[in-house]
Image: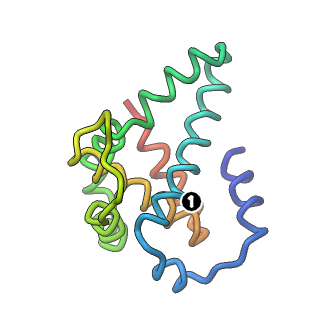
Amino acid sequence: MFEETIQNMRKDFDIKPMDVMNLQPLVLAYIGDAVYEVYIRTMLVINNKSNVNMLHKMSVKYVKAKSQADIVHRVNDKLTAEEQDIVRRGRNAKSATVPKHADVTDYRYSTGFEALIGYLYLTNNYERLMEILRLAVEE
């Protein structure tokens, strides 16, 4: 269901894979953050059907920098060399903002994770995107 929605939404926009590679890592992270957030919210709504306040509290556990940094460390050996490079580029990107509620190292790794999600989404690599998203929410 989620994969079809993402594919259908993405069909409205045309971008070539080489153009995606030329995007700044923070731009990839920007779109990747949104895709990951929608995935998490969809999962929580379908599985929990709680009130909005509880859904928000539950989603924060998944989308906070520490959690995303942990995901990167957990799945790194399952990533291709190209995917590891995308994560590295995102991790090393210089952001104008400093996180208030996160360790800088965790924040950088989470940016790398979001860049990877954005990259997979924009390159239409939905099968791999879904694999990574499913790995991200495994306990």
Which residue is rendered at x = 59% and y = 61% of the image? 126
Q: Position of residue 16 (x, y in %)?
A: 61, 83
Which residue is rendered at x = 31% and y = 33% of the image? 101
Image quadrant in which you'd find residue 85: bottom left
Display colour scheme: rainbow
Query: In the figure, 62 relative to 38: above or below?
Result: above
Residue 85 in the figure: left or right of residue 3: left
Q: Could you say which is closer to the camera, residue 86 or residue 25?
A: 25
SS for dot 1: helix
Image quadrant in which you'd find residue 8: bottom right
Which residue is rendered at x = 34% and y = 63% of the image? 90
Residue 16 in the figure: left or right of residue 66: right
Q: Position of residue 68 (x, y in %)?
A: 36, 43
| The C terminus - image quarter | top left
Report the number of discs.
1
| The N terminus - image quarter | top right
Residue 13 in the figure: left or right of residue 32: right
Which residue is rendered at x = 65% and y = 18% of the image? 52
Query: In the figure, 57 relative to 128: above or below?
Result: above
**Within 10 angstroms of label 1, few (less than 14), some, or many (20 or more) residues?**
few
Query: In the figure, 77 relative to 58: above or below?
Result: below
Q: Position of residue 136 (x, y in %)?
A: 42, 42
Q: Which residue is mark 1?
A: 127
Residue 11 in the figure: left or right of residue 104: right
Q: Position of residue 58 (x, y in %)?
A: 50, 22
Identified by mark 1, the residue type is Glu
Q: Could you say which is closer to the camera, residue 90 or residue 77?
A: 90
